[in-house]
Image: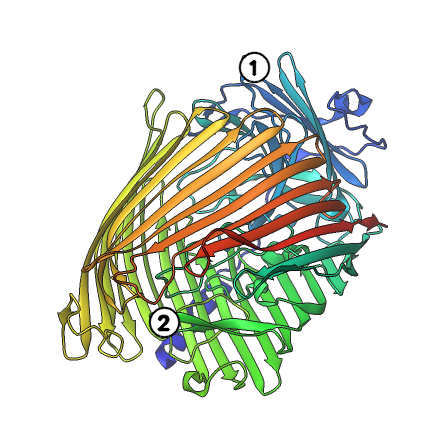
Amino acid sequence: MPNLLKFSAIFCGLSILSFTASSSESDLIIPKVNEEIVLDGELNEPFWANATKVELGYETRPAENQTAKVKTTAYIVENGSSILLAFVAEDPNPEAILASLKDRDTIWADDMVGFKIDTFNDKRKAYNFFVNPLGIQMDSVEDDVTSREDISWNAIWYSEGKLTDSGYQVEIEIPFKVLRFPNTQGKKDWGIDFMRFYPRDYQYRLAYNQVDRAQSCSVCQIGSISGFENIESGNNLEVTPYASGQRSDSRDPVNAPEWQNGDFEFDGGVDVRWGVTDNSVLNATINPDFSQVESDAIQLDVNQTFALFFQERRPFFLEGADYFSSNGFNLLHTRNIADPDWGVKYTGKTDSHSYAVLAASDNSTSFLLPGAQSSNLASSENFESNAFAGRYSYDIGEKSQIGGMITHRSGDDYSNTVASVDGKYYITDEDVIRYQLIHTDTDDSDELVSTSEEYDTGFGYALSYHHNGRNWSWRASRQELDEDFRADLGFINQSGLSRDVLGAGYTWHGEEGDSFDRIHLGGDVDQTYDYTGQKLEQESEFWVNMNGPYQSWIGFGAGVRDAWFSNETVNIPDADCARDDGGCWFDQNYFWLGANFRPINSLQLGINYNNADAVDFITGINAAKRMGYNFWGNWQVTRHWFFSASYNVTELDGDAGNLFKSDIVNLNSTYQFDKYQYLRLTVRYRDVDFNQNVVTDRSDNKAIGRQLLYGYKVNPRTVFFLGYSDGGFEDNTVSQFERTGRSIFSKFSYAFQM
């Protein structure tokens, strides 16, 4: 450990010594006007004639900074309270424009225009705003430091679009109050780029800025714009009260077949968002609305030894979530905070300093108990705990960063504290080092964790080097988490192990007229050891994938793996494996292939197939064969109606024959009446059939969940929902499919902006 600490200290020192002030002359000047905009897509306001005019002259994908195939012009001004933009997108075949009415953040397949803006001009993070030809919005936060894009971020802004005989036009208004920017007077320099996505035979990306594929960052390459003198975010106070009601009925088909009718239950609360300064935001909530209106897609949990991951969707936690992201492990997964009475969060950035604090009181406590080859869930619905998370990061030089994070969760006779330091250091534009050191301290309560699973003081680290060139890429990484490591507010489902990975790849970029615009070949080798030094896994794999016509993607991969389990877990005497003194080795081969394409722009089809030697965890730990495939599709049937479906099949075969077969179906059908309201039908179906001659202690099970939801959404926080859902099952205890629950629910919230 001392050598590791010394090694990380060297990296931190190098990062600090690399600090250099950077400045560049702005590419564009934004004019200020004293007029308001009427959003109609017409561009008939007089100020557009004096706006800064930008041509999106480059095709950056699939071609490499070639002349754009179609003409797109952007106009930009500001009026002291908002950024105002307009786009004129010309098209020689306007009948091919894909413009659909959808819920916000779902227009990824449509024609669209937009821009990204780096308000701190730190070349690390940017807001993305996009609009389709009908004015439907999509927004996100892009972070070069963590290499993530947070599409769950939602802001209240305004847009309108209009189809024309020669293409389409859109107008956009972004209030300064939804942005965070330096709290300084005078002229400001912000990073900016303008983009258009033009989906035809290929998904063309057109932009104002060129893209250097030899650089391993995106936001760092955008241009700049100057202006915004003396702007302020204004009276940036947003109060969102909500009210909800629900009635749920239930029945037990075996013991109590009559419906037990529930009472209507009502609830209410309020969320507050206050822009304390132009660059910091305070969020608070009392009796917060943490209901999840739309259901998660079903995942297979049979023959799995690790916990499944589900995304966070709740509004309070999504605001400013990017400020808690670190360069490594997921130390804050806020779905672990299940039933809080209150919550408060403060996030912001001043010069090179970013900071974030979160606190909440939780009535229900649950977290992962990680292990080297499996994880378990500790949970108690009646165990109250307090949760805290804090993060600080410092920008170094032009693109590097160092940061620290603390999380703490505690209740009666229970506490878990995690402290970490992490960073990202650019050696060159192509070469990047990431590092993270983590210390944990745990004191368990018998109510949550049995004494046989005691955890104490833990330690972990991750270190990686990446080279991302225009053609060649390679990487090396090592991570280690000791047996007492536990992060109760995060999502880390393995500990007590170390893993080393070496990998490389080569990418061919197509030329004009080539069938495939990108072909990538890669591979890696890795080894995993547990905390005693016992090797658990050794794996080598390769893959190839390519992008081509019809917006297609085709991929194939294969590998070999040796996996080890101890004698304590391999409890079948005649297990088909290579035994040694301490356990049993399983020799495994696997391959996979996948493809998706768009035969027409409005329809996307995909297929995935995998075949692998596996391990049977159902009848013991034995050699098995796993086969799985899935078909999926997304179809914009009409401008108003969108339909998506997936069908997943998994089979596991052991020495005694088939062990189980699973069929999972996820269906979504949405009819969007206009920009604001929709009706959505969701169906989740799972059918797991066990071989009763081999698996005698498990019952076949069919389960279905259905939901019909009407939504009216003025903006991300002013919404009305009315829905009905039900569910049921069929297994060996009943003779037919039986419904077990039904509910009707409603929610209304309104965002008051002051």
Q: What residue sits right under mark 1 in the picture?
A: 95
Query: Which of 721 and 311 lies nearest the eye of the viewer?
Result: 721
Give residue 423's position: percent from left, percent from top: 48, 63
- Say whether residue 526 is left or right of residue 673: left
Quadrant housing residue 432: bottom left
Image quarter (top left, top right, bottom left or bottom right) of the N terminus: bottom left
| 2, above or below 85, in the image | below
Any part of residue 26 in sight = no
The structure residue drawn at horizontal position 44% and vertical position 50%, both measured from the top left corner, is 686
- Say whether residue 616 is left or right of residue 604: left
Q: Secondary structure at mark 1?
A: helix
Query: Which of 666 and 144 lies nearest the eye of the viewer?
Result: 666
| Amino acid type for the residue under numbered disc 2 | Glu
Any part of residue 232 in sight = yes
The disc at residue 480 is 2
In primary-sequence order, the first of circles 2 and 1 is 1
Quadrant housing residue 616: bottom left
The structure residue drawn at horizontal position 34% and vertical position 41%, both measured from the top left corner, is 608
Q: Secondary structure at mark 2?
A: strand
Give residue 202's position: percent from left, percent from top: 43, 26
CA gap between label 2 and label 1 equals 55 Å
| 82, above or below 378, in the image | above
The disc at residue 323 is none
